Amino acid sequence: MRIRNATGDDVAQMTAIVNAAFAVETFLEGPRTDEARMAEAVQTGEFLVAEDDERRVTGCVRVERDGAVGRFGMLAVDPDAQGKGIGRAMVQAAEDRCRVYGCKRVDIRVLSLRPELLPFYRRLGYAETGTEPFRATRPLAGGAECHFIILTRAL
């Protein structure tokens, strides 16, 4: 596995992976993203991708910083490649990038309707440090209530 900066050439594969990985979010209507939104996100932000020996993208993560605080999100691993350490490697790569930027800590926001993700991040040294409102850009199914859980790790 190799982790590198994403380029415009990766957009189609990244879009497919994100939509497949987030398909479990049945509480949100529609796909997580589309190629136009992903292309804009890659042009205006920073994404890392993991690729396998055949140069096929198997995972991606968005990395950003706000002063001394790093953040990552949209962590997605191809469902066919899950359970092979790619997610853990992507988190490590995001943290390493935040260290390069001089960040002292890194945050991730997890939707409260995805409690199964919390143990994964706890095993990586993250602790819950607060909550934030979630402003859905798509309707929530069945009138579900949702907020972000903020998890933080010192770097």
Image (cartoon, grey):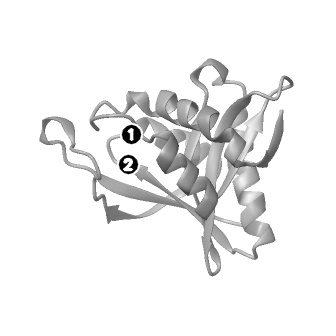
User: Residue 89, percent across and down?
Assistant: 74, 41
Q: Is residue 121 above or below residue 31?
A: below
Q: Secondary structure at mark 1?
A: loop
Q: Residue at x 29, y 52 (%)?
A: 137
Position of the C terminus, as image quadrant, is: bottom right
Of the pair 141 and 103, the residue shown nearer to us: 141
- Residue 104, can we see it? yes
Residue 16, quarter of the rendered image? top right
Q: Residue at x 74, y 50 (%)?
A: 92
Report whether 31 appears left or right of 40: left
User: Residue 136, percent across and down?
Assistant: 28, 53
Q: Residue at x 47, y 32 (%)?
A: 19
The amino acid type found where label 2 is placed reads Leu
User: Residue 99, percent across and down?
Assistant: 77, 68
Q: Secondary structure at mark 2?
A: strand
Q: Is residue 8 above or below residue 56?
A: below
Of the pair 15 and 59, the residue shown nearer to us: 15
Q: Residue at x 27, y 46 (%)?
A: 138
User: Residue 53, percent across and down?
Assistant: 86, 25
* Residue with the mark numbered 1: 114
Residue 52, quarter of the rendered image? top right
- Residue 45, can we see it? no
Cβ atoms under marks 1 and 2 closer than 8 Å: yes
The label on residue 111 is: 2
Give the Cα separation between the discs numbered 1 and 2: 5 Å
